[in-house]
Image (cartoon, grey):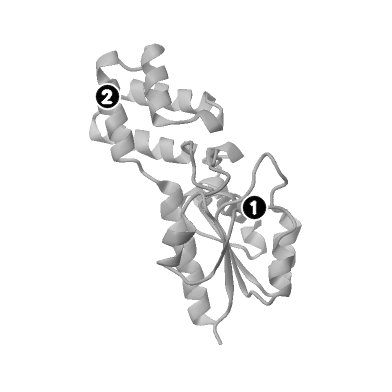
Amino acid sequence: MKARAVIFTGNSISHEDSREILRANYQPPVRRFQLDKFVQKGYKVIGIIDGIFFDRAAVGHREILSALDAGVKVVGGASMGALRASELDTHGMIGVGNVYEWYRDGVIESDDEVAVSTNPDTFEPISVPLVNIRETLKAAFTSGLVGEKEHNGLLELAIDTYYPDRSYFGLVKEGAKKGLIPEEKKKSILDFCTGNEVDVKREDAVLVLETVKKLIEEA
């Protein structure tokens, strides 16, 4: 009998898209005091992608450690899962993806690097996570569309913007207003960012699902 898996997601990747990769029990972003219920129900693999950050209590370290002690494999990446995995990988939690590695290695530290404002009904993000902005601006710089000074200025502006307000439109508009980029480059930069976004969180979410799938197959 295959191991049962529960996955907490909705922001980084939708439940619908997730089911195309892995058949599992999909739940909304995880919050505190949820894991034990699934451990008690016999789930042997838990995938944590998205989770509650600021307005309600986040999933606790002790909950994850308790699940690990019960023999459950816990995989994290992309968002809250990446943050917790970077803190608990030495205790057996499995971390995957770029965001996890950045947190683990101290490249990024703040929770708001992955935080987004979401539609309360669908969990769909309505702001852009800073990790995506970082990589998309890096791609714009690599392509030659923006220079180093423009890249650094826009990135600093994004970092200083409150996470629910982060968007490519707002970033480019405010960047031009502050003189960080010339007015005539606004459209080309916005078109690049929206049309060529590097969606790090989604890429890492897929890695979580593929890792869980492999663990189920090996069980």
Look at mark 2 in the image and give the residue it sits on.
187
Amino acid tagged 1? Glu
Cα–Cα gap, marks 1 and 2? 40 Å
The residue under the point 54% across, 83% down is: 2
Any part of residue 110 in sight: no
Residue 147, relative to residue 89: is it above or below? Answer: above
Q: Secondary structure at mark 1?
A: helix
Residue 140, relative to residue 171: is it above or below? Answer: below
The residue under the point 65% across, 72% down is: 72
Q: Residues within 10 Å of mark 1 (few under 14, many from 20)?
A: some
Q: Residue 218's x, y, as percent?
A: 50, 81
Amino acid tagged 2? Lys
Left or right: residue 170 versus residue 91 is left
**Toward which corner of the image does residue 56 lie, by quadrant?**
top right
Q: Secondary structure at mark 2?
A: helix
Any part of residue 13 in sight: yes
Disc number placed over residue 87 in the picture, else none: 1
Q: Quadrant of the C terminus?
A: bottom right
The residue under the point 45% across, 70% down is: 22
